[in-house]
Structure formats: C-alpha cells, structure tokens
Amino acid sequence: MAIVPSATILFIDGYDHDREYWVRRINISSPEYLILEANSGAAGLSLCRSQRIDCVVAELRLPDMSGFQVLLQLVPYARYPEIAVVMLSRLSFPQLAELAIKNGAQTYLVKSRISGDDLDRAIHKALVTVPPTRKELRV
C-alpha cells in the first residue's frame, strides 16, 4: 500500500552530507512526507515556484545566496507567512535566530544541538502554524 504524502517538505542545503543526513532522519520519523531537495537557494526557489511546497527547511549558508535571502523571497510579509519555513544552520548565534523569526521563519535550529526527532517536531509545529488557507492561495 502506497503512503500518501501529508505534506511536501523542501530541504535547501548546500552541504550535501548534512542535507542527506537530515532528509534520512525525517524520512524515518515521518515517512508520509514527500521530501524534495535542493543544494542552492536558486534551485530551492525554483522548486517553490513550480510545485506546491508546504514547508521549507533552509540552511543559512548556501553556495549562491544567504538563507535569509531565500526566507525573504518566500515570506515577504513576516506577520502573514504563506509557507512554513524552518531555518536549520551550523551557525549558533542568538541574533540570527531572532532575525530569522522576525522575518517570518517559524523557528531557527542549530544542527549540532538537535536530533532528527527535534527537527521533525519543529516541522510539524511549523506546518500547523501556517494556516492551510494561506497555503492553498499560493500560486
């Protein structure tokens, strides 16, 4: 019996090893998700324009742009997000977390301080935070 995806998650991370690791962990925790991958900001934004994405997990340091640039393109109005965004980074600075959340991310997680289960919970929480009606209005 095939599993019907409950949400489409896009991982944008230029660190191939990190991206593969976290995708594998989420596949174990939530096999019902359809998970897409991008290794650059431009590739991730292109996928967001061509497919319905419910949640983006983005690394702050990307090879072609900042994760903040991706965030600002996905969530132009921070108080009214149309897509759930989780920032997941190697960088551990409280100011970065504050800035990410202020600009529309649902949370900011530091890779070395979380488990796959922590990321899975953050994705679940982000998905319920962004109202489904907003997701459905996206073109």
Image: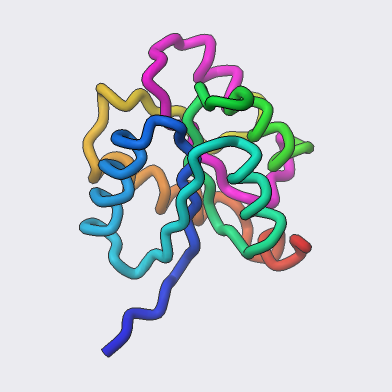
At 56% from the left edge and 58% from the top edge, which residue is drawn?
54
Identify the magenta region.
78-101
Position in image of residue 128 (x %, y %):
50, 56
| Residue 88, picture quadrant | top left
Task: Note whether 129 is above or below 134 in the view shown.
Answer: above
Q: In this view, does 52 lie to the left or right of 120?
A: right
Q: Residue at x 41, y 25 (%)?
A: 89
Q: In which quarter of the image is the N terminus?
A: bottom left
Position of residue 33 in the picture relative to residue 61 (left or right): left
Vertical relation: 66 (above or below) 27 = above
Quadrant in which the C terminus is drawn: bottom right
Q: Where is residue 112 in the image (x, y as percent from the top left)?
A: 26, 22
Q: Position of residue 42 (x, y in %)?
A: 65, 39
The percent coordinates of residue 75 (x first, y second) are 71, 40
In this rendering, would 122 be left or right of 31?
right
Residue 48 is inside the magenta segment? no
In screen coordinates, is 135 left or right of 90?
Answer: right
Q: Relative to the observer, which residue lies in front, 13 or 137?
A: 13
